[in-house]
Image: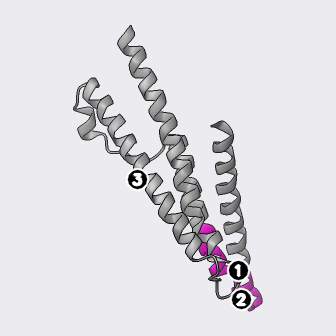
């Protein structure tokens, strides 16, 4: 699980780094050299999708997704743990469905190419199943940890 997290984190960081450097270069070329780079807008959209999908998986790995615990904090420990398990299971089902739909979309668009760079939309749409599967893996990991912790509390 650690290796998967590092790969996704490195992928998101690399995509974000390229996006920032490319954007700075595009602004410099447009406003100081007066020669805009035509492909930067298309490439920035491509990279942003990958940053979001890989970053979402990394956020799940670190348990850094935004939550609003107001209602959950009012519940008893037993209900809170039950609700956490239920939400995690529902999330995994939804993420797996999203990954399946994303992969079907990628398959359907594999022969469609972007206007400027001529990149297959397959590589752009593939970010959705990769990110969703990564997020599902980390959700299952935390679910397992939560269940183990719940059993350990019950035995003591």
**Residue at the farthest bottom position:** 34
Q: Nearer the viewer, mark 1 or mark 3?
A: 3
Main SS class of the magenta portion in the image: helix
Distance Cα–Cα, label 1 vs label 3: 38 Å
Distance Cα–Cα, label 2 vs label 3: 42 Å
Q: Residue at x 51, y 65 (%)?
A: 102
- Which mark is first along the chain, 3 or 1? 1
| Badge 1 vs badge 2, beta-carbon distance below 8 Å | yes
Magenta span = 26-48
Q: Is residue 94 above or below residue 115?
A: above
Q: Residue at x 67, y 77 (%)?
A: 120
Q: Which residue is mark 3?
A: 94
Image-based side of 129 in relation to 78, left or right: right
Q: Which residue is mark 1?
A: 26
Badge 1: how crowded within 10 Å, few (<14), some, or many (20+)? Answer: many
Q: Does the magenta segment cover residue 85?
A: no
Quadrant in which the C terminus is drawn: top left
Q: Is residue 53 above or below residue 153?
A: below
- Which mark is first along the chain, 3 or 2? 2
Badge 2: how crowded within 10 Å, few (<14), some, or many (20+)? Answer: some
**Residue 48 visible somewhere in the drawing:** yes
Label 3 secondary element: helix
Distance Cα–Cα, label 1 vs label 2: 6 Å
- Which mark is first along the chain, 2 or 1? 1
Label 1 secondary element: helix
- For the residue pair 36 and 125, the one nearer the viewer reads as 125
Q: Which residue is mark 2?
A: 36
> Could you tell me residue 79's position as x and y percent?
25, 29
> Could you tell me residue 143's position as x and y percent?
44, 34
Image-based side of 118 in relation to 94, left or right: right
> Could you tell me residue 62's position as x and y percent?
54, 40
């Amino acid at each position: 699980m650690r290796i998967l997290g590092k790969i996704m984190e490195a992928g998101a960081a690399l995509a974000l780094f390229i996006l920032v450097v490319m954007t700075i270069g595009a602004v410099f070329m447009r406003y100081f050299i007066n020669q805009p780079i035509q492909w930067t807008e298309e490439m920035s959209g491509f990279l942003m999708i990958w940053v979001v999908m890989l970053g979402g998986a990394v956020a799940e790995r670190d348990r850094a997704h935004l939550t609003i615990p107001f209602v959950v904090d009012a519940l008893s420990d037993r209900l809170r743990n039950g609700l956490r398990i239920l939400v995690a299971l529902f999330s995994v089902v939804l993420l797996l469905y999203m990954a399946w739909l994303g992969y079907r979309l990628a398959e359907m668009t594999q022969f469609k190419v972007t206007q400027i760079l001529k990149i297959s939309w397959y590589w752009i749409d593939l970010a959705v199943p990769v990110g969703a599967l990564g997020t599902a893996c980390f959700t299952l990991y935390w679910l397992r940890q939560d269940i183990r912790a719940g059993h350990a509390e019950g035995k003591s």
